[in-house]
Amino acid sequence: QVEQYTITEPSVVKSVDPYDDHKIFVKPWVGFIQRLVWIHIVLPSIHQKLATEINQKKFDFVIVTHDYFTKSPYICRYIKSKKYYLLHEPQREFYENFKIHCLDVKDLIANILRFPIKLLETQNTKFMDKIYVNSKYSQGIIKKIFNRESTIIYPRVDTKYFCPNKKVKKENLILSIGGLSKVKGHDFVIKSLYELLGDYTLVIVGEGRNKDREYLKKLASNKNKFIRFESNMSDHEMLNLYRKSVLLCIGAHLEPFGLTSLEAQSSGTPVVGVAEGGIPETIINGETGYTVPRESTIFLEAVKKTIANYHHLGRKARLVMRRNWDVKRLVNDISTILR
């Protein structure tokens, strides 16, 4: 017997998950400070009540994923079964350079006020029986932060869905994907590719605040008309955008893994990424794309080499994804763990 439980806000739900047996909707108090108080005062009782229901069913084990409010969830304190934690990333804003997580003083103050959540995360993680992470990079970070050993389960890609289509032709498009926050590095990509804007259009896919979008537009100055912002794209629209683009650029800071790298390569589109975090684990440098230091001139040269050779790099990327990164391998990895 397998059951899935989800705690979320109504405003966060964008689609129906057919595997959600139990969806618990909560309504945090309105206002930033009030919301923080709610997280510390009310949310624990919600998790405790849900844990009581789960304990009554006496599951052999419970797989725990990130909590929307606290990352490492309260519920792990109350569940009596074995608890296996899929830890994709910690609360990064507390452990990395604050400048990449804060666009202005307001963001910095917000993170300072949220600091008690860091302590919660550390405490809650101690209750996990085993931790699974998404990359070698994440494995090292979790060891450093929580002093816990972990096992890697690499995310994979559905290569039957993310695939090239001869009817969809390449266009002069370069992709950059991720929320519009500074941590995703769109600003670095814009600065690096500035001289190519006009010959190519940079398509930035991701949701964010208006001030973040305006910040990125200002960086492109008089070439901002060659930057296109997209959000709320359907899966099919996203797939065709991968297919149409000559490459995907990843300028994100310390990205723990980078699933977009797999999706692009599986669609026949090479990737140029900053050699940080888990990104180098997804790219064969010089064969399916390039990983380079965070230096604009070097990044631009890698992009130019990729544009000149995107057909060959894309074909090799597609082959590598089918051989090494297909979702069937994820099923096998999880089956091994469950056994």
Image (cartoon, rainbow, N blue to C red):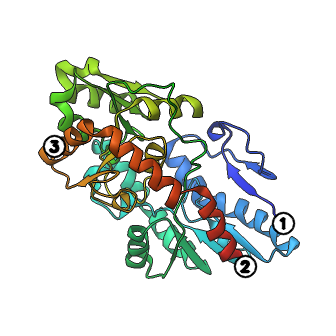
**Residue topped by disc 3:** 301
Residue 144 visible somewhere in the drawing: yes
Is tag 1's residue or tag 2's residue first in the polypeptide sequence? 1
Figure quadrant of the C terminus: bottom right
Task: Check the image and name the residue furthest to the left.
Answer: 297
Q: Is residue 256 left or right of residue 98?
A: right
The answer for how far apart the CA atoms under marks 1 and 2 are is 25 Å
In the displayed structure, 195 sits above or below 305; it is: above
SS assignment at label 2: loop
Q: Is residue 76 left or right of residue 81?
A: left
SS assignment at label 3: helix
Is tag 3's residue or tag 2's residue first in the polypeptide sequence? 3
In the displayed structure, 23 sits above or below 212; it is: below
Q: Which amino acid is tagged 2?
A: Arg
| Nearest the eye: 290 or 101 | 290
The spot of residue 106 in percent (x, y) is: 33, 42
Foreground mark, 3 or 2, reads 3
Q: Is residue 190 left or right of residue 70?
A: left
The spot of residue 58 in percent (x, y) is: 85, 76
In the displayed structure, 290 sits above or below 143; it is: above
**Residue topped by disc 2:** 339
For the point 44% across and 43% down, which residue is it?
264
For the point 64% across and 74% down, which residue is it?
84
The answer for how far apart the CA atoms under marks 3 and 1 are is 57 Å
Q: How would you rate the neighbour count of disc 2 (Cα within 10 Å): few for under 14, some for 14-19, many for 20 or more?
A: few
The spot of residue 36 in percent (x, y) is: 53, 53
